[in-house]
Amino acid sequence: MKIENIKSQFPIFSQKINGKPLVYLDSSNSSQKPISVIKRLNDFYKNEFSNIGRSIHSLAVNATNKFEETRMSVKNFINAKSIDEIIFTKNATESMNLVATTFGQQNIEKGDEILVTELEHHSNYVPWHFLRERKGAIIKFAPINEDGDIITDELKKLITSKTKIVAVTHLSNVTGTIVPIKEIVEIAHKKNVPVLVDGCQAVPHIKVDVTDLDCDFYAFSGHKVYGPTGVGVLYAKKKWLEKLPPYIGGGAMISEVKKDKIVYTSPPEKYESGTMPTAEVIAFRESIKFMESIGMDNLIKHEDKIKNYALEKLRKINSVKIIGNPKNKAGVIAFTIQGIHPHDIATILDDDGVAIRAGHHCCQILHEKLNLTATARASIGVYNNKDDIDMLCKAINNCKKIFD
Amino acid sequence: MDLKQLYQDIILDHGKSPRNFGKCAGYNSEAKGYNPLCGDLVQVYLKLNDKKKVEDLTFEGSGCAISMASASIMTDLVKGKSCEVAKKIINAFLKMIKSSSEMKSNDLDNDQITKIMSLSGVKQFPMRIKCATLSWHTLISAMEGKKEEVNTEVID
């Protein structure tokens, strides 16, 4: 399949929005789904449905096997060492809450420091704030420069003997900054500080190799990787999963239950209590297959081409300002138009069938740093092409005309 | 209503030249409203006389065109009304924007109803309703002399 024709694999693009062809530029929020993923969900519910891991009838065995096949696919896709290091959650937010809660319970005391960055999404800040509230921990923010890059020298200085964990995004959902995680992990590990990476935006758009990065925790969501909602992934080094306390208690995470004693099972099941999003996890395998069928090199090349075209065209529009100019930028383009509020931009663009997002994108700290209350954001997915960008620019010009 | 038409009407009429913008002389109540999702900020200045009549009503603020236009229309319509009538108008507006298809009020003339209905287009965008209601909630707060800031994420 040629990457240029990939749109045809996504049924959503066959419909019209407000009478116009859909130009979807909100993939950083959530991606659209290829037919293979939709079909797999449908087929599973229609012909194969059963819960996993409990019963021993044929349907249950098949479902359990299929569920574990996805775990294997995820393990290979991000190059983890073992399938036992892959935990399914409901989304990346839950993955990060899982780490903050269990790691915090065991390792964080009053006065201990947690180092995050000014780029973080609220989901990689609020769970740590809980520890500030409950345990009296201190949260520090590694600063960014005006281009939107983390100042790694400053980050280095902020790691003290009190720092217990560094939590950092791999790819900013506002500026598109690709963060040098490997370098940050090296800095932190030299001081024996573990690192959690929020990989939500990175996994769909750049190569992720957790073994090479050597991070301790890596969280991402399936729905941004062309997969179903309700599936999140937490990669964690085995030593942590064995050492940390469990998160949610109930069935499946126990090996023995007595009136006076409970023994927990081993990871990954230790962290997968209750009925999991079975169909969604199984269908998520098709998302990974979809990514693999394109090939990350091809995908990156394509998205880079569209991003560069978009930046070039947007820069030519008078009064459009692109937010952030990081050294390595992915296809996440936050912008403002002088004199037009981002929410007005988004509402008016929608009328032309162009779907973007407006607001602070769950990054209020970053917007405050940039002295902005909100931005408009166009984010690129594998299905976008130059026509989409032309339509975006045309819609922006239409929007400007209303306000002129 | 066609969305672009809505924008064109509102922007041309109120967004670009908002009525009653600034602090009015001799105001005796003020309230602040904030929409953290958009960053819309509205400050309402109210001058009530002895007979509980809205003698003057102005606003200041920054935000999207819908929030600014809504505040501008509101000040225009409520000024000169008694506190009791003002509250009726506010409630009728909030009802219209949230659930009802029309605006019922015996206290406004047809022109005024048409003006207020120009905001009804936001109903198809639930995310934007808070932009339109912010200043109205803030006015209630000013009338009731409440001290705390109105926050669209806290109110209904």
Image (tube, rainbow, N blue to C red):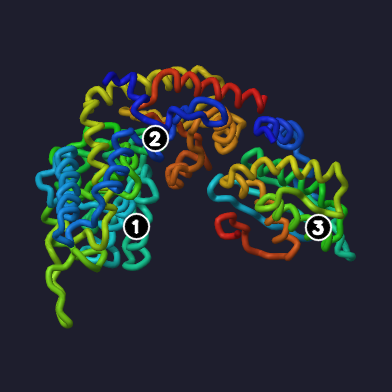
Q: Position of residue B110 (x, y in %)?
A: 86, 44
Report if residue B31 is visible in the image.
yes
Callout 2: SS: loop
Viewer-nearest of discs 2 and 1: 2
The foreground one among A295 and B8 is A295
Q: Position of residue A53 (x, y in %)?
A: 17, 58
Farthest residue to the right: give it: B51
Q: Is residue A54 above or below residue A155?
A: below
Chain under callout 1: A
Q: Position of residue B146 (x, y in %)?
A: 68, 65
Q: Gap between marks 3 and 2, in whole Å?
A: 45 Å
Q: Residue at x 29, y 51 (%)?
A: A115
Q: Which residue is mark 1?
A: A127
Q: Residue at x 77, y 45 (%)?
A: B116
Q: Residue at x 30, y 48 (%)?
A: A45
Q: Which residue is mark 2?
A: A27
Viewer-nearest of discs 3 and 2: 2
Q: Residues within 10 Å of mark 1 (few under 14, many from 20)?
A: some
The foreground one among B27 and A331 is A331
Exactly how many numbered labels are in the figure? 3
- Left or right: residue A298 compared with residue B89: left
The amino acid type found where label 2 is placed reads Ser
Question: Image quarter for residue A179?
Answer: top left
Mark before the other along the chain sequence, 2 or 1 = 2
The amino acid type found where label 1 is placed reads Pro
Viewer-nearest of discs 1 and 3: 3
The foreground one among A96 and B59 is A96
Farthest residue to the bottom: give it: A260
Q: Which residue is mark 3?
A: B86
